[in-house]
Amino acid sequence: MTVSQIADILQKDQSTIYRHMNKLEETGYVEVKGEKKTHHIPEKVYTRTAHFFILVPESEDASEILEEYSAKRMEQLYKLMKKMGANITITDEVITEGRRFLAALRSELFREYEKIDEPLDVIMLKKLELFLILFRMEESEAFRERIFRFMHKLRG
Protein backbone atom coordinates (compact mmCIF):
# COMPACT_ATOMS: atom_id res chain seq x y z
CA MET A 1 0.00 0.00 0.00
CA THR A 2 1.09 3.56 -0.55
CA VAL A 3 1.13 6.33 2.04
CA SER A 4 -1.75 8.09 0.28
CA GLN A 5 -3.85 4.89 0.35
CA ILE A 6 -3.18 4.40 4.06
CA ALA A 7 -3.91 8.08 4.75
CA ASP A 8 -7.27 7.75 2.95
CA ILE A 9 -8.24 4.64 4.88
CA LEU A 10 -7.21 6.03 8.26
CA GLN A 11 -8.38 9.55 7.47
CA LYS A 12 -5.06 11.02 8.60
CA ASP A 13 -2.77 13.47 6.84
CA GLN A 14 0.04 12.01 4.75
CA SER A 15 2.83 13.58 6.80
CA THR A 16 1.64 11.64 9.86
CA ILE A 17 1.55 8.42 7.87
CA TYR A 18 5.04 9.08 6.41
CA ARG A 19 6.46 9.53 9.91
CA HIS A 20 4.94 6.28 11.09
CA MET A 21 5.93 4.38 7.95
CA ASN A 22 9.53 5.54 8.36
CA LYS A 23 9.54 4.24 11.95
CA LEU A 24 7.97 0.95 10.86
CA GLU A 25 10.55 0.62 8.09
CA GLU A 26 13.43 1.39 10.50
CA THR A 27 12.23 -1.30 12.90
CA GLY A 28 11.73 -3.86 10.14
CA TYR A 29 7.95 -4.20 10.21
CA VAL A 30 7.49 -2.90 6.65
CA GLU A 31 9.68 -2.61 3.59
CA VAL A 32 9.45 -0.82 0.27
CA LYS A 33 8.11 -3.26 -2.32
CA GLY A 34 8.16 -0.96 -5.31
CA GLU A 35 7.01 2.33 -6.68
CA LYS A 36 3.69 3.52 -8.08
CA LYS A 37 3.15 6.68 -10.08
CA THR A 38 0.04 8.73 -9.55
CA HIS A 39 -0.26 11.67 -11.93
CA HIS A 40 3.47 11.27 -12.75
CA ILE A 41 4.38 11.56 -9.05
CA PRO A 42 6.28 8.51 -7.76
CA GLU A 43 5.12 7.02 -4.49
CA LYS A 44 6.64 4.13 -2.51
CA VAL A 45 4.59 0.96 -2.17
CA TYR A 46 5.06 -0.63 1.25
CA THR A 47 4.52 -4.22 2.28
CA ARG A 48 4.75 -5.90 5.66
CA THR A 49 7.81 -8.05 6.28
CA ALA A 50 5.90 -10.94 7.89
CA HIS A 51 2.46 -12.51 7.64
CA PHE A 52 1.84 -11.45 11.23
CA PHE A 53 3.81 -10.16 14.19
CA ILE A 54 3.79 -11.50 17.71
CA LEU A 55 4.21 -8.69 20.19
CA VAL A 56 4.66 -9.87 23.74
CA PRO A 57 5.02 -7.03 26.22
CA GLU A 58 6.50 -7.87 29.59
CA SER A 59 3.74 -7.99 32.18
CA GLU A 60 5.38 -5.19 34.19
CA ASP A 61 5.45 -2.94 31.11
CA ALA A 62 1.97 -3.75 29.86
CA SER A 63 -0.25 -0.74 29.58
CA GLU A 64 -3.55 -0.43 31.38
CA ILE A 65 -5.36 -0.58 28.03
CA LEU A 66 -3.61 -3.81 27.06
CA GLU A 67 -4.42 -5.37 30.42
CA GLU A 68 -8.07 -4.36 30.15
CA TYR A 69 -8.25 -5.78 26.62
CA SER A 70 -6.54 -8.97 27.76
CA ALA A 71 -9.00 -9.37 30.65
CA LYS A 72 -11.99 -8.92 28.33
CA ARG A 73 -10.55 -11.50 25.91
CA MET A 74 -9.97 -13.96 28.74
CA GLU A 75 -13.52 -13.48 30.02
CA GLN A 76 -14.82 -14.00 26.47
CA LEU A 77 -12.75 -17.20 26.21
CA TYR A 78 -14.20 -18.51 29.47
CA LYS A 79 -17.76 -17.72 28.34
CA LEU A 80 -17.17 -19.61 25.10
CA MET A 81 -15.82 -22.55 27.09
CA LYS A 82 -18.97 -22.52 29.28
CA LYS A 83 -21.18 -22.48 26.18
CA MET A 84 -19.29 -25.54 24.95
CA GLY A 85 -20.09 -27.36 28.20
CA ALA A 86 -17.08 -26.64 30.41
CA ASN A 87 -18.01 -26.59 34.09
CA ILE A 88 -16.04 -23.51 35.15
CA THR A 89 -16.61 -20.60 37.50
CA ILE A 90 -15.77 -17.18 36.08
CA THR A 91 -14.44 -14.70 38.66
CA ASP A 92 -12.11 -11.72 38.44
CA GLU A 93 -9.45 -13.79 40.20
CA VAL A 94 -9.78 -16.63 37.66
CA ILE A 95 -9.61 -14.14 34.78
CA THR A 96 -6.40 -12.65 36.19
CA GLU A 97 -4.96 -16.09 36.91
CA GLY A 98 -5.82 -17.22 33.37
CA ARG A 99 -4.10 -14.21 31.83
CA ARG A 100 -0.97 -14.84 33.89
CA PHE A 101 -1.01 -18.55 33.15
CA LEU A 102 -1.36 -18.09 29.38
CA ALA A 103 1.23 -15.28 29.32
CA ALA A 104 3.78 -17.51 31.07
CA LEU A 105 2.95 -20.45 28.83
CA ARG A 106 3.18 -18.37 25.66
CA SER A 107 6.45 -16.85 26.81
CA GLU A 108 7.92 -20.34 27.13
CA LEU A 109 6.55 -21.40 23.75
CA PHE A 110 7.79 -18.23 22.02
CA ARG A 111 11.33 -19.25 22.91
CA GLU A 112 10.66 -22.39 20.85
CA TYR A 113 9.17 -20.35 17.97
CA GLU A 114 12.31 -18.23 17.77
CA LYS A 115 14.18 -21.33 16.58
CA ILE A 116 11.93 -21.50 13.50
CA ASP A 117 13.13 -19.41 10.59
CA GLU A 118 10.11 -19.55 8.34
CA PRO A 119 6.84 -17.65 8.06
CA LEU A 120 3.83 -19.08 9.88
CA ASP A 121 0.22 -18.05 9.47
CA VAL A 122 -2.03 -17.79 12.51
CA ILE A 123 -3.65 -21.19 11.95
CA MET A 124 -0.28 -22.95 11.65
CA LEU A 125 0.98 -21.10 14.72
CA LYS A 126 -2.04 -22.24 16.79
CA LYS A 127 -1.60 -25.86 15.65
CA LEU A 128 2.10 -25.70 16.47
CA GLU A 129 1.27 -24.25 19.88
CA LEU A 130 -1.20 -27.06 20.58
CA PHE A 131 1.30 -29.77 19.64
CA LEU A 132 4.09 -28.16 21.66
CA ILE A 133 1.78 -28.13 24.69
CA LEU A 134 0.83 -31.77 24.13
CA PHE A 135 4.47 -32.81 23.78
CA ARG A 136 5.41 -30.88 26.92
CA MET A 137 2.55 -32.50 28.83
CA GLU A 138 3.79 -35.94 27.78
CA GLU A 139 7.44 -35.18 28.58
CA SER A 140 7.20 -33.20 31.82
CA GLU A 141 5.40 -34.12 35.01
CA ALA A 142 5.94 -30.58 36.35
CA PHE A 143 4.36 -29.08 33.22
CA ARG A 144 1.38 -31.45 33.50
CA GLU A 145 0.94 -30.46 37.14
CA ARG A 146 0.93 -26.75 36.21
CA ILE A 147 -1.81 -27.38 33.65
CA PHE A 148 -3.87 -29.49 36.05
CA ARG A 149 -3.52 -26.99 38.94
CA PHE A 150 -4.79 -24.23 36.67
CA MET A 151 -7.70 -26.38 35.43
CA HIS A 152 -8.71 -27.11 39.04
CA LYS A 153 -8.76 -23.36 39.78
CA LEU A 154 -11.03 -22.86 36.79
CA ARG A 155 -13.52 -25.36 38.13
CA GLY A 156 -13.76 -23.40 41.37
Image (spheres, rainbow, N blue to C red):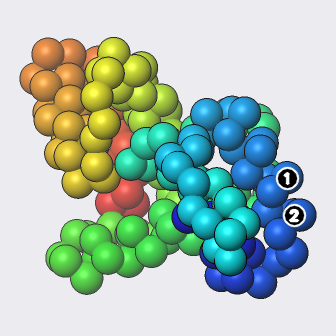
Specify the quadrant that holds the C terminus.
Answer: bottom left
Left/right placement of residue 136 relative to residue 25 reads left
Residue 66 horizontal/vertical position (percent):
69, 57
What separation in Å lies between label 1 and label 2 (alpha carbons)? 5 Å
Q: Which residue is mark 1?
A: 19
Residue 145 shows in this picture: no
The residue that disc 2 covers is 16
SS for callout 2: helix
Residue 110 point in image, percent of width and height: 41, 28
- Dot 1: few (<14), some (14–19), or many (≥20) neighbours within 10 Å? few
Amino acid type of the residue that numbered disc 2 sits on in the rendered structure: Thr
Q: Residue at x 22, y 70 (%)?
A: 86
Residue at 68% from the left image edge and 77% from the top image edge? 39
Residue that appears at 87% across and 63% down: 16
Q: What amino acid is labelled 1 in the image?
A: Arg
Question: Residue 53 bears which disc, if any?
Answer: none
Instruction: Left or right? Give the position of 50 relative to 34.
Output: left
Q: Residue furthest front?
A: 40
